[in-house]
Image: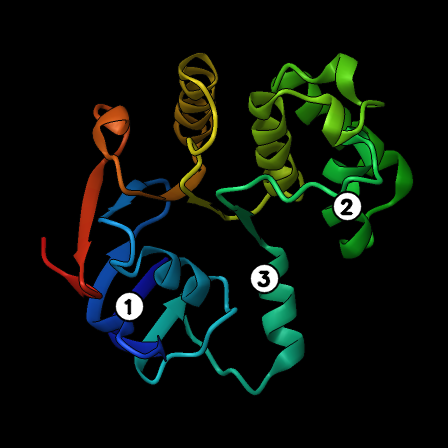
Amino acid sequence: MIRFLNVSLEHLPGRGIKGVSFSIERGQFVLLAGPTGAGKTTVLRLIYLELIPDSGQILIEGQFQHYNRKRELALLRQKMGIVFPEPRLLPDRNVFDNVALPLRIAGWKSRNAHLQVNRLLFRFGLKDRGRAFPGELSSGEQKKAAIARALVARPFILLADEPLSNIDAEASAEVLEHLRQINAEGMTILAATHIPDPYQGLAHRTLHLRNGRLIE
């Protein structure tokens, strides 16, 4: 599904990844673990096609990436869901509109989009918060809204960068349960974290990064 073949990238002096190779199969829950600066976010940004490797090759859905084909890259990026350490919700739009944004960009019909957004809001316990604005939500609710937005367009993979950051223990437990459920339903998940312990029993395997290299 996703393969890195000896991929290297130095996007800042001394920062990036070096000779990284791994594969992620459909339906797996893979943890990308390592300290701050290990290269975890770089790997996610390479998968999301936000960065271009200096060397090596990346296959997504069996296709080598050709970074000069901007339309193809844009279409592929729309098929991925990504969650950042901070929710990145638009402050001037309510929860419903924030979650619906990927569908509007993708050109979904209004009725279908409405049904899909409501389905995700209900699933994440946000049904009664659709008209609320991000500033009116708790940090846990903001995180759940961000995950709902990442999933709303039915991506083939969820990329989660520190999905438990800046939320309390109760909200973390809720987020972990949601990740467990969506993975059990077949969603492929790659989650980056510097604290792997909470994911024990959830992730199928862990990739350990240190100083830009895959060590285990």
Give me the residue at 77% from left, 12% from top: 128
Say whether residue 162 is left or right of residue 69: left
CA–CA distance in space, label 3 to label 1: 17 Å
Residue on which the image places disc 2: 101
The answer to whether residue 61 shows anywhere in this view is no
For badge 1, the amino acid type reads Phe
State the SS at label 1.
Answer: strand
Contact? badges 2 and 1 (CB < 8 Å):
no
Q: Residues within 10 Å of mark 3 (few under 14, many from 20)?
A: some
* Residue 175 spot, x, y in % from top left: 46, 23
Give me the residue at 31% from left, 79% from top: 13
Residue on which the image places disc 1: 4
Say whether residue 86 is left or right of residue 201: right
The answer to whether residue 14 shows anywhere in this view is yes
For badge 2, the amino acid type reads Leu
* Residue 106 spot, x, y in % from top left: 76, 55
State the SS at label 2.
Answer: helix
Residue on which the image places disc 3: 77
Q: In what quadrant of the picture does the N terminus appear?
A: bottom left
CA–CA distance in space, label 3 to label 2: 14 Å
